[in-house]
Image (cartoon, helix red, strand yellow):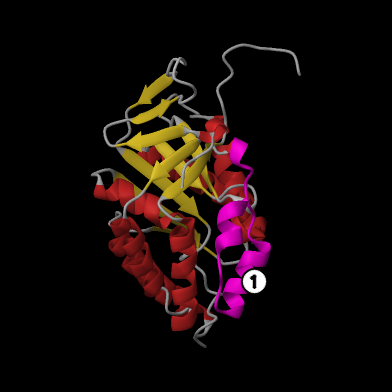
Amino acid sequence: MKPSSYACVSLTLMASLLATGCGSDDSEAAAESLQVDTILAVFAHPDDEVSAGPLLAKYAREGKTVYLATVTDGRWGGASNDEEATALAATRALEAQCSTSALGLADPLLLEFEDGEVSENIYAVKATVAGLIASIAPDVLLTWGPEGGYGHKDHRLVSAIVSDVFQAGSADGSPWPKALYYPGIRQVELDSYAPATQFGGVLKSIWGTTQENYLQYAITVEDEDVLATKAAIACHDSQWDEATQADLSVMIETVGETIYLRKALQEGIEKIALD
């Protein structure tokens, strides 16, 4: 899949984050280079990471240190088992470890807020995420977009909290991430997805898409990154039975070899009037 002319910026994290323009032959490539060694992805639940799995696997495979932070313990999930809440939280912690191992990431960072209670703990989550960023000092951040994938309230709130923390910057002048990115899926990919299960059908009907002109970055992943994501999906037995896992794998395959991102904020070079 090839990005359109207005979303043709490539994102490479082999030695640096390199954004290059790619217009007509006579256009000059406008580029900014940012050294990236450490990436922190922050998601709401154990299993959310598979939505960006190929991207995370790619950069881990290329030698970057990639951390996954999971805000909630997932204790109220469990579509595929009947464990009580505390036991399920422990199970999902093990599943998160399995998933990060499959993707080649560092051990998961489990923040252990109660599943479904992010809205009741906004300030505590915000302080914890800020402290985590300060301690890890990642070069870039990744989190859910404002749509939260399929709109789950915890997904949306984690997106808002991470964005809030990032835009506030460092309180004491210590190193701070240079950029925050949201993964996005285009409508054309979603339309191409042919789910085989009811769960997959629901996902297709409610998953949020992003207009292509907002997706500034197109990242090519390899087959091995997709395979690593399928292995990560299989780790989450408490959430998905075999049929659903297969359907999610098809969804990952449908997205294909190109993962799209958009930058959450652009630095203001100069103050201008509204258009």
**Mark 1 neighbour density, 10 Å: few (under 14) some (14–19) many (20 or more):** few
* Residue at image point 48% right, 33% down: 8
* Residue at image point 66% right, 12% down: 271
Q: Quadrant of residue 226?
A: bottom left
Tag 1, which secondary structure? helix
* Dot 1 amino acid type: Val
Q: Is 208 in the magenta?
A: yes
The front one of 33 and 172 is 33
What residue sits right under mark 1 in the picture?
202
Provide the major secondary structure of the magenta segment.
Answer: helix
**Vertical relation: 165 (above or below) 248:** above
The front one of 51 and 112 is 51
Relative image position of residue 149 (x, y in whole percent): 59, 57
Relative image position of residue 252 (x, y in whole percent): 45, 62
Pick the quarter of the image with the C terminus: top right
The front one of 269 and 29 is 29
Relative image position of residue 243 (x, y in whole percent): 47, 82
**Highlighted range, magenta:** 187-213
Q: Quadrant of residue 97?
A: bottom left
| Residue 241 in view, yes or no | no
* Residue at image point 32% right, 28% down: 35
* Residue at image point 41% right, 69% down: 233
**Vertical relation: 146 (above or below) 203:** above
On screen, residue 36 versus residue 90, left or right, reads: left
Farthest front residue in view: 25
Farthest bottom residue in view: 82
| Residue 25 in view, yes or no | yes
Q: Is 220 in the magenta?
A: no
On screen, residue 263 versus residue 106, left or right, reads: right
Relative image position of residue 136 (x, y in whole percent): 35, 41
